[in-house]
Image (cartoon, helix red, strand yellow):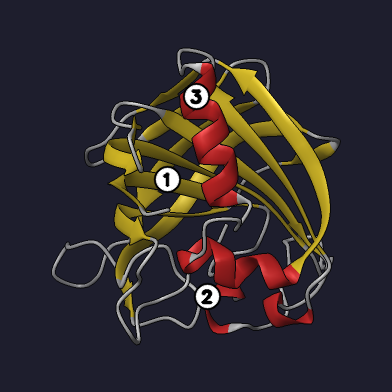
Amino acid sequence: MTWSISGNYLAGCSCAVVCGCAVDAMPHDPQGREECLGCAAFHVAEGHLDEVDLSGVDFALYNQFPSHLTAGNWKVGFVIDDGASDAQAAALERIVSGDEGGAFGELSQFFGENLGVERASISLTDGEKPRLSVDGRTQLEFEALRGPDGGPTKVKNAMFGFSPEFTIGTTTGSSQAFGLTFEPTYGEASEYAFSSEQPEGSPTGRG
């Protein structure tokens, strides 16, 4: 089977700014705990798994990383927008679980516990200050860090990233899903593009 998805994403987590997961560093939150609790939401502007059209669907990944990323034993949960059809939901579940290869297939080697798949209303905005709402679970608002020229601070060519280059900043709000509760601190946002045939040297997606 072949698949591709592309669009924009917003991620927020409990790590103190800046989150070290992108460089496989030990996570630290503002209270000194060495774990990363997070949520990354994706809007699929264009996408498919074989003949299943995934365009217009939103989904969110929830994570608990108990140590640096390559130590593994991740807890992961998955929410799909309740406006998606059953066929679209099944296709996205196969992609994100790693069953269909590509970047998510590479990540699946680190999964320790699958917390399941749920359906809920998801709203993800784009622009200078993107916002995320996962009904009854998560509310995030992103604010980019700024450099001396006033432009957004970006990370490029990270070991773990949903995009070759992404904007980093802070998030405010709250999140409680799959038994994973956290107050967001760090955030990142960008466009993304994944497929079943990732180009050599492309970054691996992360939550």
Please tell me whether mark 2 sits on a helix, a strand or a loop. Answer: helix
List the residue tagged with mark 3.
87
**Quadrant placement of the C terminus:** bottom right
Q: Nearer the viewer, mark 2 or mark 3?
A: 3
Please tell me whether mark 1 sits on a helix, a strand or a loop. Answer: strand
Task: Give how far across and how far down residue 44 sits, in percent.
Answer: 33, 37
Count of numbered circles in the view: 3
**Are dots 2 and 1 in contact, CB under 8 Å?**
no
- First in sequence: mark 2 or mark 1? 1
**Alpha carbon distance from label 2 to label 3:** 32 Å
Nearer-the-camera pick, 12 or 207 = 207
Residue found at x 42% / y 81%: 158
Instruction: Say left or right for 83 vs 98.
Output: left
Instruction: Say left or right for 169 vs 12.
Output: left
Q: Residues within 10 Å of mark 2 (few under 14, many from 20)?
A: many
Residue found at x 53% / y 28%: 89
Task: Give how far across and how far down residue 86 sits, in percent.
Answer: 54, 19
- Per the rendering, the mark at residue 144 is none
List the residue tagged with mark 2.
22
Nearer-the-camera pick, 165 or 76 = 76
- Residue type indicated by callout 1: Leu
**Alpha carbon distance from label 1 to label 3:** 25 Å
List the residue tagged with mark 1.
10
Task: Give how far across and how far down residue 146 sits, in percent.
Answer: 28, 62
Q: Residues within 10 Å of mark 3 (few under 14, many from 20)?
A: few
User: Quadrant of residue 136 in the image?
Assistant: top right
The reply to whether residue 112 is visible in this rendering is: yes
Instruction: Say left or right for 150 vs 63.
Output: left
Please tell me whether mark 3 sits on a helix, a strand or a loop. Answer: helix
With respect to residue 175, does 149 lie above or below? below
The reply to whether residue 129 is visible in this rendering is: no
